[in-house]
Amino acid sequence: MKGYTPKNVNQVSADQALNGIPMVMTPNQLPHQFSTMVRDDVGKTRGVAILRQKGNDIEYTFAYWDITSPVTQAHFHYGPHNQVAVRAFSICGVKGDSPDCPPGTKNSISGVWKNADIAAVKSGDIVIAFHTQKYAPPIGEFAVYVPAAK
């Protein structure tokens, strides 16, 4: 994904992340957990992601602020680190498939990925991508990678 730089600081594994450990998303570092990619030209984007496995489902909450423009779509995508591939589940913004994304440049999104592909999450093959009005699909403003389970 041209224009993106991966950032790795103190990664937790997918099995830890699925137990609700918050993942802090920043453009330059993740003070505590996750791998993230933020556009090099974005600089102020901040956010927190929380995942929790409940049986075959994944409950999620994403909160973000200081983004360049409102989120228009967000998805769980298949794809190993540094790649985004086929959409696995729509979080918001895809008509007929998910609710509208919340307005504004500071907001949050919560929901449940029913019958989630837990194996793909645990193997590190899931990317969570956020597209904004300024950075529409196929590019996006920021993305989060879930590292493989230990």
Image (cartoon, rainbow, N blue to C red):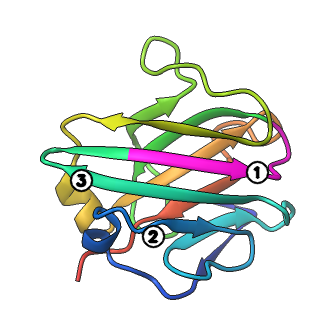
Foreground: 41 or 31? 31
On the image, numbered disc 3 is attached to which residue? 53
On the image, numbered disc 1 is attached to which residue? 65
- Mark 2 and mark 3: span between their CA atoms? 21 Å
- Mark 1 and mark 3: span between their CA atoms? 25 Å
Q: Are discs 1 and 3 less than 8 Å apart at CB?
A: no
Q: Residue furthest bottom?
A: 10
Amino acid under label 2? His
Residue at x-position 84% and y-position 60%: 42
N-term-proximal mark, 2 vs 3: 3
N-term-proximal mark, 1 vs 2: 1
**Up/down of 148 relative to 41, above or below:** below
- Number of numbered tags placed on the structure image: 3
Please tell me how crowded label 2 is: few (under 14), some (14-19), or many (20+) other residues with Cα within 10 Å: some
The magenta stretch spans which residues? 60-69
Q: Is residue 99 left or right of residue 38?
A: left
Nearer the camera: disc 1 or disc 2: 1
**Up/down of 70 relative to 53, above or below:** above
Q: Main secondary structure of the magenta part?
A: strand
Q: Secondary structure at mark 2?
A: loop
Which quadrant of the view contains residue 7? bottom right
The mark found on residue 81 in the picture is 2
Q: Position of residue 32 (x, y in %)?
A: 54, 81
Residue at x-position 51% and y-position 67%: 23
Q: Position of residue 75 (x, y in %)?
A: 48, 40
N-term-proximal mark, 1 vs 3: 3
Which quadrant of the view contains residue 74? top right
Foreground: 92 or 125? 92
